[in-house]
Image: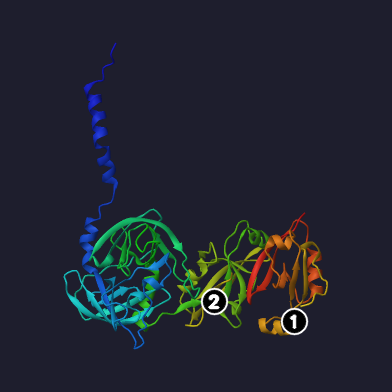
Amino acid sequence: MKTKIPFTGFALLALAFCFSPLAKAADLPDFQQIVRDNSPAVVKIIVEQQLDSAGSMQPGPGDIPEELRRFFEFRGAPPSQPERMGMGSGFIISDDGYVLTNNHVVEGAHSVLVRMSDRREFDAEIVGTDPRSDLALLRIDASDLPTLKLASDDDLEVGEWVLAIGSPFGLDYSVSAGIVSAKGRSLPTEQNENYVPFIQTDVAINPGNSGGPLFNLDGEVVGVNSQIFTRSGGSIGLSFAIPAAVARNVVEQLQENGHVTRGWLGVTIQDVDKNLAESFGLKRPRGALVAEVSRDSPAEKGGLRSGDIVVRFDGKDIPSSADLPHVVGLVAPGSRVDVEIMRDKSLQTVTVEVGGLDADESYTLASGKSDGKSGGRLGIQVENLPAEKAERYGLNGGVVVRNITPGSVAAQAGIRVGDVITLIDTSPIKSTDAFEEAVDKLAGGSSVPMRLIRDGSPLFIGLKLPG
């Protein structure tokens, strides 16, 4: 006997089958209104760079590392000519003519031209630049201009839809969309500075998009497009934008002062791995380990010490060492903030008055004949640090590693010949006798920190002793 399907049931199944793609399509965002409302405030930045008499010039895309480069397109005269032209993007942030773009777009510019979507063109004045965040503020002589709004909060979420408008390869006002792939990406500069917690997206970004806006679905600017990861010179779905919070802080300071001042602690920091976390009493790796505190710095005056692990700063969690510069840099100099630290295997809080970061100050991410002292269970041979080296390093003693037994605790921890040991657990190491005494006190099965000076830089490592 054949089974009969009632017509109404069959019709419903057919309708569900036919319209399910439409239902799915209806769930996708519609960017049309965002583009209509906001594209008039997106501008094209055209710059001319003057070469000196020897023919030198600002670094171009070919001079930037292949895999991670800022996307600023050079066109026009070849390098042998006295000028060359470059193009980027930007956007208007006030109706009296302030325009935000990337610093690398206008760096070294002989002249800057701003072209609007209605084809009007204006010569632009560079109000101020901030190379550390790669932002620049321009001003054009115009009024009643369309503007864009920087997002006022920082609630952007991974997986959220975002939209970019810019001029890739000189193609004016192109639109591309994607999602937020990650937040808080650290991309240290050549000076090993790390002040921008970049937004990573899969939005198609290419040369010419530099300085353009990144929108959320509310039409707010959540980021300023700045860099791409590429092997071909074009987009492969890894682009990075400067968050609106950073941009807003920079704009306010450039408008008021013409320069940017950042919060500064005066510490050298390193990441916390599993061994270090265990040795310092943390349940899991987190925070920024203070490897060194600069003399007379805000950190020293506030009571921070070498060996402290900063886990919260000004109420914000510090998941890794790279997050500390992001947070501190946004704090106004002179502010007093609470710093939660792990010290002596217990959580403590100190209050620090944040200083101001000058041009020559930055955060650093740390990366003879033997006298027979061998460190017993550690498997290393050490000798007293020569007085001239102690003076050079600013130390009041220490021991130098001269030999390491293969397979020993020291070898497994990554200690190297030439390292200078200054602290084991809580015991300062000023001589070989102090070293032997400290090692003898170590309990079997324990995890303890050891502070080293390696190639002139302080470093903590974790030692895991056998039971």
Residue ID at (28%, 13%):
2
Distance in Å between CA atoms under marks 2 and 1:
31 Å
Please tell me whether residue 7 is drawn above or below residue 268 in the rendered image. above
Residue 400 in the figure: left or right of residue 329: right
Instruction: Using the rendered view, name the quadrant where residue 446 is placed.
Output: bottom right
Disc 2 element: loop
Q: Is residue 217 visible?
A: no
Q: Residues within 10 Å of mark 1 (few under 14, many from 20)?
A: few
- What residue does disc 2 label? 265
Instruction: Using the rendered view, name the quadrant where residue 450 is placed.
Output: bottom right
Q: Residue furthest top?
A: 1
Which of the two labelled residues, at mark 2 and mark 1, occupies the earlier sequence position? 2
Of discs 2 and 1, which sits in the foreground?
A: 1
| Coordinates of residue 388 in the picture (x, y in percent) | 71, 85
Residue 116 in the figure: left or right of residue 28: left
- The quadrant of the rendering that contains the N terminus is top left
Q: Which label was assigned to residue 88?
A: none
Q: Residues within 10 Å of mark 2 (few under 14, many from 20)?
A: many
| Coordinates of residue 434 in the picture (x, y in percent) | 79, 73
- What residue does disc 1 label? 386
Across the whole image, how many numbered discs are drawn on residues?
A: 2
Please tell me whether residue 59 is drawn above or below residue 168 in the rendered image. below
| Coordinates of residue 60 in the picture (x, y in percent) | 36, 74
Q: Is residue 211 visible?
A: yes
Looking at the picture, tell me which residue is in the foreground, 464 or 296: 464
Instruction: Using the rendered view, name the quadrant where residue 288 is placed.
Output: bottom right
Residue ID at (26%, 20%):
5
Disc 1 element: loop
The amino acid marked with disc number 1 is Pro
Residue ID at (23%, 32%):
15
The amino acid marked with disc number 2 is Leu
